[in-house]
Structures are given as C-alpha cells and as structure tokens.
Amino acid sequence: MFLNAKPIWLTDRENEMNLAAVFEARVGDLKGTELYIAASTFYRLYIDKNFVAFGPARTAKGYARVDVLSLNRWRGVDESLLRIEVVSYNCRSLSTCLQPGFLCAELRRGDEVLAFTGKDFTARVLNEKEQYVERFSIQRHFGEVWDLTKKPAALSPVSKMQNPPVFLPRVAPYPHYEDIWLGKCLLRGTYREDSSLPLIKQCYSWKNVPAYWGVFQEEEIPHKPYRFVHAQKQTVTKRSPALPMVLRASEYALFDFSQIECGFLQLALSNAEEADIVVAFSEYCDGDQFTFTRINCHNVLQYILPAGHEGILRSMEPYTMRYVMVMVKKGAVGLLDLGIKTFERDMAGVRQVKFEDKTYADIYRAALRTFAHNAVDLYTDCPSRERAGWLCDSYFTGTAEFHFLGAVPVEDAFLENFRLFKDPMLDNGMLPMCYPADIKPEEDGSGHHIPQWCMWYVLEVRDYLTKRNTAVDPELFRPTVEGILQYLCKYENSDGLLEDLPSWNFVEWSDANSWTKNVNYPTNFLYAAVLLAACELYGDETRKEKAHRIQRRTAALSFDGEMFTDNAVRGEDGALRNTGNTSEAGQYYALLFGGIDLNAPHYAKLKAHVLSGCKGVAESGRRFVPVNAFIGLYLRIKTLLQLEQYQLLLDEVGDFFGGMVERTGTLWEYRQMKGSFDHGFASYAAYAMCVALEKLKK
C-alpha cells in the first residue's frame, strides 16, 4: 500500500501518553498528487496554513487504515509546506485500541514517490499542545490545553516502528467538512469565583479513572479548566453584543449555534494581549446561564496566547456542542467570530422524504443530522462522550444507513473491524461489546463484555448479508457467528436455556437489567432468534429445531396467563422458580423473537397491554417496569411494525421525539434531558416512521 514510506515515531517515545508530534516536508507543485497516510492515534493535515483532513478511520488492534487524499486542489504553487500533526494517546479507551504512536505517509504522483516518512519529513514534539492534562472522558482520551507562548521544540530524531501494523484501505467514505461561522453572539458578561457554588472537580463515567486506563497524577497537571468553569458565577451585562468584541480578564461571551453541531471548534482572533482563555461547550443550556450537561466528560479547551497572536484557533479533535462560552482568565482577546468546522458523514444523495406533518418532517431532519454525526468512520453511540462503536446500537443504525443512502459503506467498515478482533482477554468466540476499544478486566482476569450484544451482532450480520450488502460472501462472517454460538452453548442448562451468562448481562436500561440472574427469559428469546439467523445464513437445520425448542420452552416457563415474566431463580433445592418480575421490554423480546401469535385467544390480555403501551400494568400490583429509551422503546417500535400498528407507531414516535428537535436539532439517548442529546441509534426512528407512512398510504 505504501511504496517507500516507513512507519516512524520520535525515537524512544512511542509509548508515552498524550504525546503530540508534528512532521513537516517542503514539496513542489501538488498538481496531480495524492497523500497516502496512516497514523496512531489521530492525525491532522495542513498544507501551509490550510486545513486538509483529520483521520484516520479507526480499525482493529494490530491494523491501521490508510487514507488516500487528493492534494490537486492546492496545485499551482512552486513550494508548499506539508504539515502533519499526530497525537499519540497511548491510553486505554472505548473509542480506539491502545497502540504505539506512529506516522506513515508518502506523497505520490501516480507511481512516482515525491516525499515519504523515513527520508523527507522532519519531526519535533508539538510542545505547544500540553501533554500533562486531565482526561476528556474515560471513553475517549485526553483534553486539550494549548500554550502558544512556547517556542517550537528542536527537531527530534525518529526511528522506524519495530512492529508495524497491517495496513488496510479505508472503507468508510471520507468526512464532510464545512465551516460554519456564527457571526453573532448571544450575550456577554462578567464572572467571578464564588465559593458557594458546588465545585465539581471531575465528571467521569467512573468515580475515578483507574491507572490501568491511563491517567496523569493530579500534581502533574498544571491546568484544570473544567473545575475552573464550575467555580465561576456568571453575570450577564449585555444581550446580542456586536462582533468583533474585545474580552478582558473576568469577562465572557456566550454563543448559540441554535442546534447541536459536531466538529472542530474554531475561534477567529485579532491581535491580543498575552492572554489565557478557557472555552467551555455544552449540548444544551437553560436560560442565560452556561451549564455543562451531565454527560460525564470535560467539555473544555484552554489556550494560553502570546501578545499579538491572531488567526484561527481550532481544536485538535472533533467535539459536540450547541452552546459555547469563551472566558478570559488573563489579558485580553479580540474575538472576531466563533464557529465550527463540521466533521460528519457526507450525506450527498441521501433519501429525502416530504411530510405533510411538520412534526414528522422535523424528526426526519433531526434523524438525518444525528446519523451524519454518528456514521463517519464507524457507527458511534454519540459523537461527544464516547465516539464508540457499540454493538446492538449498530443493529439499528445499520437499518438507518441503508434507508437513508441505499448502501452501507460505514457498516462495511464497522463489521470488518469486529471480524478482525483478537484479544486473549475474551474467551474464544466472544466479541467485545464495542470496538475498536480496549477491554476492562474483570476480577477473575477475564474481559468485561455483554453476551447479549454479541447476539445482536449475529442478527445484524444476517440483515447485512441478506438485505443490505448481498454481494458480500457470508463465509467471511462464519468464524465470528459460529464462535459466538459455540461460546453461548456452554451456558445451556438441562432445559436447553441459557443460564448464568457471565460478565455484564444487558437487557435494557431499566430494572429489567437487574433480573438477569440464573435464567433470563428475554435473553433466551433473543438466543432463539440468533440460532434462526445462523441457520438462515449457513443452512444448519439442527439450529432451527433447537431455536424452536428454546422458543417453546421459554414461552411455557415465562408466560403466566397474562404476560411474560423476566426470570427464574434457582433455589437451594436446585429447582428453578419464576420470580414474577415483569418488564415491558420482556413482552417485546417475546413477540419479536419467540414465535408468538399475539392473536391467539390465550394472549388476549397481553395484546390489550401491548396495544395500550402497558398502561395500568404497574397499578395491578405486579412487579413491573416500563421500557426505558434503549433498547425497550426501539423494541416496541419494531414490535408495532411487526403487528402492523402503523398509526400507533407514528403517534408514539411523534410524541417521543417531537420535542427534541426544537431544543437540539438531534435525537437523544433518553426521553429526559440527560446523557447524550445526539445518539446514533435514534436515527432508526426515521426508518420506522417512513415504513409506517408508506404502509398507511396503501
């Protein structure tokens, strides 16, 4: 894939955490040239002062995807500076795999190599980007603090990487970049430290970041902008102030994109005094006060600027925001404008649908935006806290990609990553719950995983191979599908049902998830569907027979004459006994995967419950929990499609998602305003809505 280039890094520094380096080469006319480039963890490419690209596309551990970037646009200049900034995080996360830092790049015109790493590029530490900072989140990596008063570091020696990755072509489309400048400010004001405010020092998904995941010690970190923002009381002094503006110490300005945007935050500055500024951003704020949404990440940047600095400050990584607050800690800055360079899926050729109802039109538009933000190089849950490629989420996002674009190149890449997975921390056959990602160890040394998410992988693979990309050879997926089945069958009990699956059993985000001990009936209905999918793909009829036995046995044990219960617990005498615990989600697992005929007379009460949204069940005295957003709501949507309850589906989709659009222009993780307000799987709502509307027209 590379003709001459060698993967290189700064000598003896390939395993340092959060080390940024810059590689430069002076090249001639770029007419007809392409840059072949791969890196770990991320790179940012400039030609002279022009932003070109951010990458690479992520993939499995031991591999690296190669971007091929046309530079012909910058032709006609006798000499240009090719500048590649690479940040090597070297920490564990849920959005990449821990691998040593490297860059491999070569500039070509046809088969002629004009410049390549290992010969033509100089290298130095990008010491303007502070190395010792707090993590942005556990799921991602480190935050960004830039000290532009530092002089560039001296040139560094480089060494060829000892164990280079296997290079793979990029499969996902290249991102869409677009500059959005606001040209206006919402308000400005002053701030002061207020000891009465609740000081939040850190906000992560775990109380503390374990050393295993990679973290600097508190005393090593000189700048802590997240806690600085929390300590300040804001006072509004002017609404809709004009741009440009000068902000001085203890002053701030608040900006509003009017909807969530994803990409690289940009500040256009004129001449400044020596200054220290903090930039905080949030997916939503109420009223005049800037607040962080509780999403367990540090949405802050910090820039220390020399006197006279001017130009554009641009974040290294893409972030997610609607509101942005610029705070001056010291000195003064001339703020010309604030904006974002988008980083999202190219949606050219997307399926456009006209709706008579404004609510549906708004939801569809929001679903398109949500999908574009979460389908760049792989399917992500959210583009903010995690940017992680979760299974099960991907089952729904894959349906959305095919609906929107009629092809699934991002799913191609996403599933290939899982096919390439190898890690001895997980038992043979089991796949990680999200990937590329690092695995959290359990106390017994095994790897943390979600057995149910691997089942959703099989269902996604079945739909992918039979509906969305039929040109792909199913044999490519046989090892992973068969491996999952061989892993699961070890946990079958004497009834043939799965019992006591290890690690994190996940049914949905409700109390139903606490009812997974011993035999969980929703999981066994799902298991039956997995066996049927494997039979459909690979033709083993014994699996179909086994699936039907599991369906019949699970239904017989779990149905109590009114509803399906969730679990049975094994007593001291060795007998399994139904707990009576009942979840709304459990009904949809049964109806979707249990071969249940809801029109049969003995299911009459259940049918009434399902069509009413299980209203009133809790009041009956039954130990019952309604669905949460994920995945229970989406199982309900699938169930209503299966039952051909199209108007009911539309009513519920409109009710659930309608209010989200006006607040953020995206679709959320939950009904409530918590978590991510831009969650990939939610784009499935557009598909379901369109199917329902088309069916009602017939």
Image: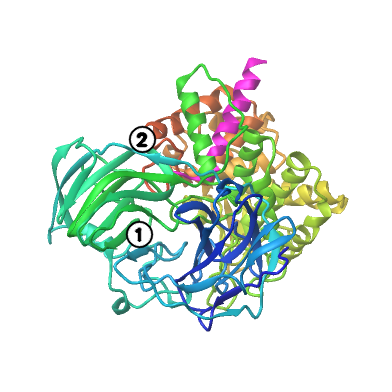
Q: Are marks 2 and 1 in contact (CB under 8 Å)?
A: no
Quadrant of the image occupied by residue 439 = bottom right
Note whether 489 is above or below 588 in the view shown: below
Kindly identify the residue that appears in the image at 28 percent across and 36 percent down. Answer: 184
What is the chief secondary structure element of the magenta stretch? helix
Instruction: Judge left or right: residue 152 versus residue 414.
Output: left
In the image, farthest residue toward the front:
78
Please give the range of residues in magenta. Answer: 677-698
Depth check: give the residue in front, 617 or 692.
692
Instruction: Judge left or right: residue 155 versus residue 327.
Output: right
Residue 524: percent from left, percent from top: 67, 53
Residue type (three-letter) at the residue carrying disc 1: His
The answer to whether one can see residue 471 in this image is yes
Quadrant of the image occupied by residue 244 = top left
Mark 1 lies on a secondary structure that is loop
Say which quadrant the C terminus sits in.
top right
Number of the label disc, if any, that sits on residue 263: none
Quadrant of the image occupied by residue 219 = bottom left
Mark 2 lies on a secondary structure that is helix
Note whether 482 is above or below 606 in the view shown: below
Is 407 a magenta residue? no
Say which quadrant the N terminus sits in.
bottom right
Kindly identify the residue that appears in the image at 67 percent across and 66 percent down. Answer: 63
Instruction: Judge left or right: residue 251 versus residue 660.
Output: left
Per the image, the residue denoted by label 2 is 663
Depth check: give the residue in front, 116 or 345.
116
Is 695 a magenta residue? yes
Number of the label disc, if any, that sits on residue 298: 1
Note whether 395 is above or below 131 in the view shown: above
How far is mark 2 from mark 1, CA to CA? 22 Å
